[in-house]
Image (spheres, grey):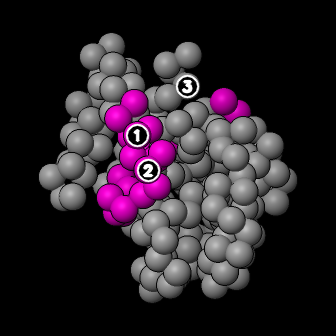
Amino acid sequence: MLRLLKPDACYPSLYEVDLDGLSRKGIRGLILDLDNTIVEYANASVPDRAVAWVREALDRGFRVCITSNAVTGRVAAFSEALGVPGIANAVKPASWPFRRALKLLGTAPRETAVIGDQVFTDVLGGNRLGMFTVLVNPLSTAEMVTTRLVRLLERRALAYLRRKGLLSDADWRTREGRRAHG
């Protein structure tokens, strides 16, 4: 069960994800979380770096879809601004939003990566369907109260994976490095 919580890769942020490395692994589709992955939680403006990152991914031949637990209006605004499909009210880690994203992308699970900031939604949901999972640090510490509580469990789960040799020291340092930055 805990193996389902193990990300395949960890990066300081979405903007540092190695697209070339994903391509070499045969990844063609990217399922992106929205809040604290693409943009800070509750920020309504689309950052220029998000536009540039998605444009670069699309230019490299990746298919991109936003899949978020956020409400329809928020996801639709970002989806439209970034020029990619979006799935709102996803109730991740439920499998249906990931399956729907796969259909929109036209990719199989083994050629799709899920990129997000939460273990119990993004990583668990992606791993359950056999996708490549990428855990990024949250862009902000501003989050819903429930998310802050889940972060405590997330940290314990990742520490356990590290102790069991399922999470590398480098990935642990990448994740724990966010604590020093705020």
Three-letter code, disc 2? Val
Question: Residue 145 — which label?
Answer: 2
Above or below for 83 versus 134: below
Q: Position of residue 140 (x, y in %)?
A: 34, 63
Three-letter code, disc 3? Leu
Residue located 65% across and 39% down the image: 93
- Between the C-alphas of marks 3 and 1, the distance is 20 Å
Above or below for 70 versus 95: below
- Image position of 48 (left or right of 85): left
Above or below for 148 versus 67: above
Crowd around label 3: few <14 · some 14–19 · many ≥20 (10 Å): some
Asked if disc 2 and disc 1 are in contact, CB closer than 8 Å, the reply is: yes
Q: Is residue 132 highlighted in magenta?
A: yes
Crowd around label 1: few <14 · some 14–19 · many ≥20 (10 Å): few
Question: Residue 4 — which label?
Answer: 3
Q: Provide the residue span drawn in magenta.
A: 128-153
Above or below for 153 versus 114: above
